Every structure is written in structure tokens, then in C-alpha cells.
Amino acid sequence: MQIHACLRKNENLSRNRGLLFSGWQTSCFHSSIYQYNTAQQQQVDSTGITTPSSSTGEQHQFQAETRMLLDIVAKSLYSDKEVFVRELVSNASDAIEKARYLSVQGEGPILGESDLLVSITTDKYTKTLTIQDSGVGMTKEELISNLGTIARSGSKAFVEQLKEGGKGGGIDPSSIIGQFGVGFYSVFMVADKVEVFTRTRSQDAVGYKWTSDGCGSYTIEESSDAVPGTQVVCHLKTENREFSDDDTIKGVLKKYSSFVAAPIELNGQQINNIQPLWMLEPKSVTPEMHNEFYKFVGSSYDNPRFILHYRTDVPIDLRCVLYFPEGKPGLFELNREGGDGGVSLYSRRVLIKNKAESVMPKWLRFVKGVVDSEDIPLNLSREMLQDSAIIKRVRTVLQNRCVRFLAEKQSKEPKSYQEFFEDYGIFLKEGIITATEQIEKEEIARLLVYESSSRPSGDRINLTDYISKMPDTQQDIYYLAAPSRELAEQSPYFEELKRRGIDVLFCYENYDEVVLMQLRQINGRNIVSAEKDMRRDRDEAKYDEAKGLDKSETSGLMDYLKGVLAGKCWAVKTTPRLKAHPCVVTVEEMASARHFVRTQFSQIPEHTRFSLLQPTLEINPNHPIIVKLNSLRNSNPELAELVSKQLFTNALVVAGLVDDPRTVVTNMNALLEKALVKH
């Protein structure tokens, strides 16, 4: 049932590789395996052999359908040939773990740690790769059962026996890697002949040699060359001779098997000498160990800025070591489509995916480290993840933990967090924009920090602290987008809020207001732009007519401006909220309008632009420029028209609604020329 279910789950993978099987073929494979294994076990139980022996040993034949399945496993299940090394080393590690268990239980010889070893030898002249372990070894029956039966995992059966017996015996079941019983056959991707020498550790045990070319049969014979444990000799195909090269195998081992529990030696030199820190207790790991480990798993030269080392059992089993880099992000990381993420996925200390983008949200792609979980379901080849519901749960758990961790840093190490936010704040903002749930947006938003009008330059405040300091009369969170603090404080949109003593967040990046517009609210408080606040009707004192235009003059000037600015300005009205500025432009949604101007304005004709924006010009009848403009309407109509257009253009520039500043120069030069006529 196992291979049948896995083949069905991997139908999409098979289709991509031209191996789509119809239902009756899959059923045939499953039935043939069952019949073959049953018949073979019956023959072994009754006679101890499967077919009459030959001069070189007993020969065992696979049935035709099983031979086809073996061909699929060996040639089409894995995307990279190099993973056969990972599979063979994992099998060797499992054998050693079993030997350790039997030794502790007193069911086998007493073994020291120095006796438990995976030894690998390469030979370029004979094109061979040899992987030998000092584990439990196999009997003849186990050879037939484990190597002669595809999709039967001896390691999985061993773990099930442990669980059923309720005995731990000092062994952690998570250290047993094997699951599917197909990894061994990946060797036939690169080898045209495989020899397995094995002997159990029991007294007077007989050694055996298992040989196969992967083409449908194998032989078993007694061997005096077999030593306790198992030795796999891979006779490589000519086109795969690179796997008999020391450097090639060293690279593969470092990539996939650096953290296997058993020591691994390659030609006498230990390879896996870096500890899997995520398996250790956080308190036992020193900063120096983390620095070294970070450089290894992150391929980095800097040191980690923050370190998150933790384990959780609920709602899913995870062991993690996550690093927040000290260096600034590169252009490749800033590009959302450019990277696959910096977290590697392991299962039982064996690498599954080097850059596992699916287990971390995209906006956390700058985080580096390791995630190890026994609960993540894998496909047969252990190269692809299955069950999107569990993967989504893992991603949610990791995101929530990272957000909570950064919130703790923000509270306990504000200076360090400030430096982190300056470098990586753009990723947090991306997380808010891409999040689909409001609660998720708000959790990430608590990590944002901004300068505000009530604090000195360089001092930032988060949204939670901003809300806690709001007076009872204030209901909303206010922000103002501007290129710098100086321009923000001089903005006409800030003038009224400053007069009312309201603290305003200053947003200096173009995408800040898009983020806050997406966020909309936090803790039940609406997030409102200063420009939108100007459009609100308030019962406030009107402007002082004694200091400026009266109602009749104001009405006439408004009608005049509507005529001069026809096609660009949709409405003209007065505002009592301006004191130091002559006028201001408002639109319905200023943040959306600015985003529209930056992204699409140049592609649309001018008359269409203004019909979409529908800007309103709000004038201050008390300002000297407005008062003088009213008198110019009659005394110098040409100059009055130039001034009116320039005032409107200036207001558009201040509002950030001009896509190309060069467009204002022509009218400005004409205005200067007219103003200098008398000089």
C-alpha cells in the first residue's frame, strides 16, 4: 500500500518526467510487489532459498513489473544523481544507531563511540565508491527482505518495534532516518554494478555478499571478506566517474550529511565535524559556536545580528536555529523573485532542501538557518514536500515565532533593533502588504517604527507606543508622507494637526503610505493620512475677514480660479486650516493617488490624469499672496493667470502629484519674466 499511495501522490512529478502511469498499471505494480514479496517470503521460510543456486551464489529474479518499478526508482525518482550518496550514508547511519541500541540493551557486543563509524573510500582508477558502516549488519534473510524488496524499510520496522515494545534504550527514534525503503536503489542511477558485503555482530555470524546490476536480479553468496557491519561497493558507470573523486564526494557529504549522528570519514578524514546546533540545548551553545555554524549554513562572512534557537512540540514538532544577519541585504535579497529563502530544511539531521522557500513566508527570506522537523511529510525521494496544510502550519508557526522574537528585541534592545529596522524594515513592510489576514498584518505592523512630530529627529516610535500615548480625545493614528523631516514639518497638511497638538508619524519612503493604507487599522484605531484629515468637515472658527478677503471677494476669486484652472482643478473652496500657506490641493485618497502618479501617470494623457484625480484647490483667504492675486485679476490679468497656475502647480508638487518636476519650469519662467518687466 505504501508504494501505491506514494506513486499516486507523485503523479504530477511523474507526469513532468514523462512517467505518467494509468490506474491499471499502478495497480499492477502494487499487486506484483505484494505477490512477489509474499511468495518470496514463503520460499525463504520453507527452504531458505528462492531459486536454485548457481556457481557464484543463489540468484533471485525480480518479476517483470517489479523490474520496471526498480528502473523507475533508480532512474526517475530523484532529480539529482548526487543524492544517492545521501541515501547510502543515511542507511549506514541507521545501521549504526541500531547497533548502538542493541549494545545498550545488552543484546549485542559492547561498543564504544570509536567503534561506530561510517567510512567512505574513493578510487578513481577502478571507478568505485565504497561506503562502509560498523552497524548491525544483515543476515541472509534480512538481505533478501531489505534489499530484495522495494519499498520495505527495515529502519521503519525497527522504529515501530521500539514503539510497540515501549523501550527507548537510550536511542532517539528521530535519529533513525529511513522511511520509505527505496533510497538504496538510487545507487543504480550512477552504478552498473553494486556489491554489498555484510555480517551481523552475533557470535559465529556468517558473512554474505549481495550483488546486482539493477537490471532485474541479484545474487547472494557467503563471503569471508565481510566484516561486522555493511559495506556497499558502487562500480560506477563511466559517465558518472566523478563520484569516485574525493572532492566531489566531499562536497556532496558537506551538503547533505554534515549533521548525521555517526562520524563520517572520507579516505581517513572526518567530514562531519560541525555539530548540529539545533539538536542541542540553547544554553549549551556559545556565541562562537553560533558564529561558526551561521557561516556554514548561511554561506556568509559576517556574524549573526540576532539568534533565535528554540524547539516546539505543539502544534507541530520543530527544532530551529534561525539567524538574522548583521550585514545589510543585497540586491538579490531585495528582489522578491530573486531568492529562494535562506532557511534549509532537515529531517532527522539529513538535508532535504537547501533553500526551502515553502517553510518560511517570502518576506522572511533574509533569515538564515536550519529547520528540522519529523512531522513534515516528504515524498519518496525526500526532495519534495507534501500536504500543503501541514506546510502552511509550519510556515505560520515560524512566522509567529519570528515576529514575537523581533518584538522582544524591540523592547529589550531598542538600539540594536533600530539598526536592524533601518536595514531590514522593507521586508517587514512587504510582509504587511502580502499578508491576507488582518490579524497577521497587525502582528507584523507592531514591529514598524517611525519618527514622529513629538520626538526629536532620529528617535522612532512603534504603533503600540503611539496608541498608548494618544490623548482620550484622539481616535485615529495620523501619518504624513514626505521625503524628509524638514519637508514634513513645513508641509501645509501638517499645519492644522500641529496646531491641535496631535502627534504625527513621518513616513519618508514612497512605499510607507502604501503599507499603512493596506494596514488600515491596528488595535481598533484607524490609520489616517494628514491629507485625508484636511478633507474632514469640522466645526471650527472661520478665517478672519478683517485680515484678508471678505466673502464677496473670496467668492469672486474662487469663480475666477475655476475658470483659469478648468480641466485641471475640479473644485475650489476655502479652508480655515491654513495659516502659513496660501493654498493646498486635496484628493479623495492621497496615498492611492500618489502611488498612481508614480506608477502609471506618464502613460495617460494629461486631461485623463486630472479627470481621474479630480483635485480640489483649497485656498487661505488671509494669506498675502491670495489677497494680492485677487487685486491682480483686474489690474494685471495676464500676471494673475500665471500666478494662479503656478500656485496650483506648487500645490501639486507639495502633494507629491507631479510625476516630472520639469513640467513646472515653463510656466515658472513665464511668471518670472512677467514679474520682472518693471525692473
Image: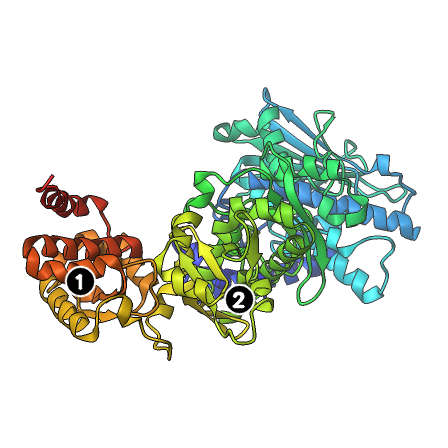
Q: Residue 137, relative to residue 440: is it above or below? A: above
Q: Amino acid at mark 2?
A: Glu
Disc 1 versus disc 2: distance between alpha carbons?
34 Å
Quadrant location of residue 396? bottom right
Seen from the viewer's position, the closer of residues 446 and 307 is: 446
Direction from residue 147 to residue 382 in the image, left or right: left
Residue drawn at (32%, 63%), measured in percent from left and top? Answer: 590
Q: Is residue 25 visible?
A: no
SS assignment at label 2: helix
Q: How many marks?
A: 2
Residue drawn at (64%, 36%), measured in percent from left and top? Answer: 303
Direction from residue 451 to residue 538 in the image, left or right: left
> Residue 659: image x %, image y %?
24, 50
Seen from the viewer's position, the closer of residues 302 and 408 is: 408
Mark 2 nearby-residue class (10 Å; few <14, some 14–19, many ≥20): some
> Residue 442: image x %, image y %?
53, 66
Q: Is residue 293 visible?
A: yes
Tell me the quadrant of the picture where the N terminus can be found. bottom right
Kindly give the residue lying farthest to the bottom in the view shown: 539
Q: Amino acid at mark 1?
A: Phe
SS assignment at label 1: helix
Direction from residue 629 to residue 59 in the image, left or right: right
Direction from residue 93 to residue 10 in the image, left or right: left
Between discs 1 and 2, the one toward the N terminus: 2
Q: Nearer the viewer, mark 1 or mark 2?
A: 1
What residue sits right under mark 2 in the picture?
Answer: 442
Mark 1 nearby-residue class (10 Å; few <14, some 14–19, many ≥20): some
What residue sits right under mark 1 in the picture?
Answer: 610
